[in-house]
Amino acid sequence: MKMTQEIENRNNGARYSSTLLKSISKPGRYAGGEYGQIVKDKATVKARFAFAFPDSYEIGMSNLGMRILYGALNSHEDIWCERVFAPWVDMQEQMIGHDLALCALESGDAVREFDFLGFTLQYEMCYTTVLNMLSLAHIPLRAEDRCEEHPLVIGGGPCAYNPEPVADFFDLFNIGEGEEMLPEIVRLYIRMKDEGRYTRADFLHEAARTIPGVYVPSLYRVSYHEDGTIEAYTPIYDDIPTKIEKRIIQDLDRAYFPKTVVMPYIETVQDRITVEVGRGCIRGCRFCQAGMVYRPVREKTPDVINCQAREIFDTTGYEELSLSSLSISDYTRVGELTDKLLEWTNPNMVNLSLPSLRADSFTKELMDKVTSIRASSITFAPEAGSQRLRDVINKNLDEADLMRAVNVAFEAGKNQIKLYFMQGHPTETDADLAEIPALAHRVIDEYYKNPNRNKARPPQVTISVSPFIPKPFTPFQWEAQDTLEEMRRKQAFVGTCVTDRKIKYNHHDAPTCRIEAVLARGDRRLGKALEEACRRGFKFDAWSEYFDYDAWMSVFADTGIDPAFYANRAYGLDEVLPWDIIDCGVTKAFLKRERERAYKAATTPNCREACSGCGANKWGGERACCPNSKS
Amino acid sequence: MLSEQQIVNRKPKEAYPALEQPRTVRVKFRKIGNLQYISHLDLQRTISRVLVRAGIPMWYTKGFNPHAKMTFGLPLSVGAESLCEYLDLRIDRDMSCEEIKDRLNGALTDELYVLDVYAVPQGSAFADIIWAAYDIRLRTQGLSPSLADEIKTYLTTSPLMMDKKSKSGIRQVDITTLIRSLDSSVENDELRIRATLCVSGSDYLNPEYLIRALRERFGLLPEGDMTSEYTILRTHVYLTDGVTEFK
Ligand code: SF4
């Protein structure tokens, strides 16, 4: 503990000056010093890693992946991983005005001085913020322009399954789960430095050659056909893989999991304990990328989850615990797990919340256990209004299931239901769309039919509809997105079908979804557009107040990019896709089969009912539901 | 911070005998460094989690939405540090003040750190705090020794009218009436002001008013100058006589 005299005489030297922090909004975003942050001696560590989240502090600090990887890297004594987030707009103005470079939170040192700068790519609309952060950090945007003294810029996360649009800006990508791969990459760097044989080029080559899951885009040439489609990916060395196989964690029970959390002082989006129950999803909705790329489905055991949650509670004092999963009720031992958790969460007044509940598994028993469901409203995601279209997307949800679920909610005194849908699924007609409000009307009828409802309050149903975005590695990856005009027409059409004031209708911003489609299915040629967007000051495109569709269109026009080529074109089934360089386990043959079934409105059983041979079982995995898996 | 092992080995709070009546203990803590940027609301949320992870046997309010009972002393504005913040806690088990202090510090960093925990003296209340002493420092170029005297004279000569915000709106106030004492000196590139200011109710004088006065009258710390810095540190709080320290 520091003595009073020492405090009175100290100098507030390093990092951003106090005058700067006093002049901007929410200085707590940049101050660091949180309880649980990890500080090491920079003179003795062998590699410094800046873990960057390309969005605001409040969003980034809520991310579980970042918590895990921060801890996993720091569990190596000679590696120091720090955090860095995108400074908010007011701070950026000051930084540019005073020529200040982007700093990491723990040390306050410029990230430009680090060995690694790693970005987690959680959504496509963060790409401009990635470039924005590189430029604030005074690091050349393009990998080819960086020299030995610059940090190695690496990327990972869900968007790395199609890294091509941002390939020019990264030295290296992690494909798949990073807990093991990321430390391996840093260890290789340390080893080569220790042995005195490190150069940037040699390191990248050796990483690509020896570490599974590493993709070094500069080591692959892309050639194109005259019509603009891709001809081939050609590795420039013959000792590197021709397809990068994603990495998975074999045994989630034994995977690294942090025992504590860096506790933000300011309020963040998800300021609570989050523990995964497993990875992957047995369902196979045909539009859903997460449901495909995280296969095979692997579970943790309830004891492990319980211990991990308890440990974090003991070290943090959080008042809420959230179980994370793509579909929590599909966890095979959900009853056993919640019982174990409630034993200590209840007496300690910790609220248990379960996201992503499916209507077909929503029961009174579960509702009584879990606090979040006690809130006044409850959310389900039928994703399509008509049964035919729900079969097309393989949602495997009957209207009867939904009606049963809403009745459980009504009998518990709830009067508000939120329903999520998408518009623009393949084969959709206006009749399917009209079923969205019609379904909401039927939920309202159901309310009045229920004798045990809360008679004091009228029902309210909120329908939220977002445009379909074709995503890589899904059965719908080849589909065209609706044009902007068509998206808007459909949005208006659904609006005209809402005839009851008890129905609230929201829809997502169509222009944003169009740009997201371009970035999701883009190839390397988008690099020049992103570079130009950065030059024009684009950032925070995931924030509606900073998203400017017309500005995007002029960037595309000026860089010779046709957005319709990526968003509104049906990709050919035999075409080389930009993400064909990646092997995520799920085979193209399976995706094609699923696409054909979609067009016949034929559903596919979930992985637990029957294996559909998607191919992901080749990775193995403990407590995976796949038959004949490798292990 | 405690090590994992220390947390595992700690006695659970349930192992302490229950009190017949809840007891109030006073916590004196400092809030310095990075913590100066944390608002009062954020501090409250932080402390409520600290109490849980430290295993303090808090007394909980009864009713639909039970919460731990804690009362903070004076407000401290964002951008000011302090060595003398106070917080009263109500506990329902017999845990010693020494142990509460150790447990809290095991769950805190150096910048938010408990200096003392003690039973609340008979009749003592936060409303008794009328004055607070501040140590204000400005690090900037071009300070002359004569400036120290000019500043002192300016800030202590009545009337010094300033627009002061209060709940009922902005009004003109002679701020010298809210300054009990003030001294100023210049050493190297640092201007230092030690001042005792009123902190009572609507007469609360935020030390930022002094900074504003210096800005307006002497052109110190011009807007946008990031090389100059100032710090405000609250060092003591006093009762109405301005001499007796609050306990
Ligand atoms: S291999 Fe079979 S069970 Fe495993 S994820 Fe694929 S479809 Fe599901």
Image: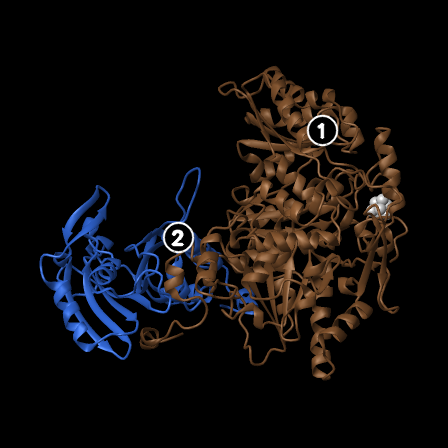
Chain colours: A brown, B blue
Task: Look at 51% across and 66% down and name the residue there.
Answer: A101
According to the picture, the residue beneath numbered tag 2 turns out to be B44
Q: Are marks 1 and 2 on the same chain?
A: no
Give B108 or A334, whichever is nearer the viewer: B108
x, y percent for residue A575: 86, 46
> What is the three-letter code of the residue carrying label 1?
Ala
Q: Which label was assigned to residue A384? A: 1
Task: Look at 71% across and 60% down and name the residue there.
Answer: A168
Task: Look at 23% across and 46% down and name the residue there.
Answer: B166
> What is the three-letter code of the residue carrying label 2?
Gln
Chain designation of label 2 = B
Tell whether label 2 touches label 1 (CB within 8 Å): no
x, y percent for residue A461: 58, 25
The answer, for residue B112, to whether it is visible in the render is: no
Where is A397 relative to A575, above or below? Answer: above
Q: Dot 1 lies on which element?
A: loop
x, y percent for residue A10: 36, 75
